[in-house]
Image (tube, rainbow, N blue to C red):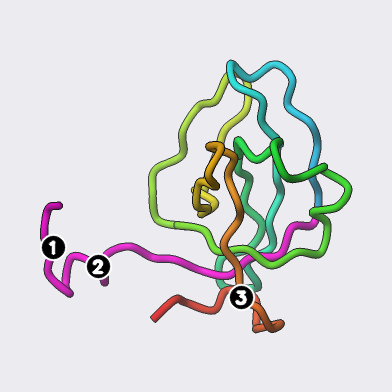
Amino acid sequence: MAEITFDDFQKVDIRVGRVVRAEPYPEARKPAIKLWLDFGPEIGEKKSSAQITAHYDPEALIGRQVLAVVNFPPRQIGKFISEVLVLGVSDADGGIVLIGPDLDVPLGGRLH
């Protein structure tokens, strides 16, 4: 495992966003869901393509708070531009489980 410094960690801007819209993304190479996330007034709304279909249906994601890296450059995923990286952890079968606060917190809040 490669070590990083605390300064390296501080460069990764991880914020809380709320899913305001979600749609299936069948055109993606791997099954995915298109997400629109509200990060509050400082960052605004951003889009993401997430391979989370093993555990989540788009309509059930609306209103959920999740953590995402907001300072990566945008990435083209098929015809969709993914602006943030939603964070998750693989379960025992390789399905992604989203990471988010267990209590409601202000949108745009930064992970410390």
Note whether 75 is above or below 1 in the view shown: above
| Residue range corresponding to the magenta coloring | 1-20
Q: Mark 2 points at which residue?
A: 9
Q: Which of 8 and 31 is in front in this view?
A: 31
Q: Residue at 51% across / 69% down in the picture?
A: 15
Q: How far apart are marks 2 and 3 (CA)?
A: 19 Å
Q: Residue at 82% across / 43% down in the picture?
A: 58
Mark nearer the N terminus (2 vs 1) = 1
Secondary structure beneath dot 1 equals loop
Q: Residue at 64% across / 75% down in the picture?
A: 107
Q: Nearer the viewer, mark 2 or mark 3?
A: 3
Q: How far apart are marks 3 and 1 (CA)?
A: 25 Å
User: For mark 1, does the 10 Å Cα neighbourhood hold few (<14), some (14 to 19), or many (20 or more) residues?
Assistant: few
Going by the numbered disc 3, the residue's amino acid type is: Pro
Checking the image for residue 4, the label placed there is: 1
User: For mark 2, does the 10 Å Cα neighbourhood hold few (<14), some (14 to 19), or many (20 or more) residues?
Assistant: few
Q: How far apart are marks 2 and 1 (CA)?
A: 7 Å
